[in-house]
């Protein structure tokens, strides 16, 4: 296996005040991302993700605990 990175989503902005982020998805939706736990070469750890009902997603990462962190 090679160390190539694949872009699955991009952070589009903060969502709410609790540190959640809005995601622009490039693939099969939020459910497909839930199979991955680490993003940005290990810099972000996924805690939960859900579909936003608009073709994107809303995610919570362990490293983001406030809107400013997001």
Image (cartoon, grey):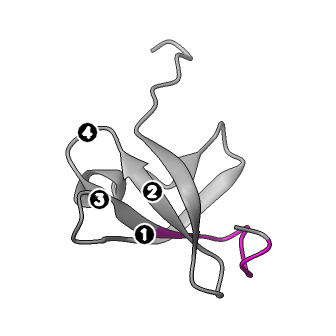
Q: Quadrant of the N terminus?
A: top left
Q: Is residue 53 above or below residue 26?
A: below
Q: Quadrant of residue 63?
A: bottom right
| Residue 26 locus on image (x, y percent) | 32, 38
Marks 1 and 4, the one that precedes in the sequence? 4
Q: Quadrant of the C terminus?
A: bottom right
Residues marked 3 and 1 touching at CB (< 8 Å) = yes
* Element class at badge 4: loop
The residue singled out by tag 4 in the image is: 27
Q: CA distance from mark 2 to mark 1?
A: 6 Å
Residue drawn where x is 65% and y is 78% of the image: 19
Marks 3 and 2, the one that precedes in the sequence? 2
Residue drawn where x is 64% and y is 40% of the image: 40
The residue singled out by tag 3 in the image is: 30
Please tell me the numbered disc located at residue 58: 1
Q: CA distance from mark 1 to mark 4?
A: 15 Å
Marks 2 and 1, the one that precedes in the sequence? 2
The residue singled out by tag 2 in the image is: 23
- Mark 4, residues whose alpha carbon is within 10 Å: few (<14), some, or many (≥20)? few
């Amino acid at each position: 296996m090679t160390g190539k990175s694949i872009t699955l989503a991009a952070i589009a902005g903060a969502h709410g005040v609790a540190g959640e982020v809005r995601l622009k998805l490039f693939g099969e939706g939020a459910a497909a991302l839930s199979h991955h736990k680490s993003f940005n070469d290990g810099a972000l750890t996924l805690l939960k993700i859900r579909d936003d009902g608009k073709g994107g997603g809303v995610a919570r990462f362990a490293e983001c605990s406030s809107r400013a962190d997001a």
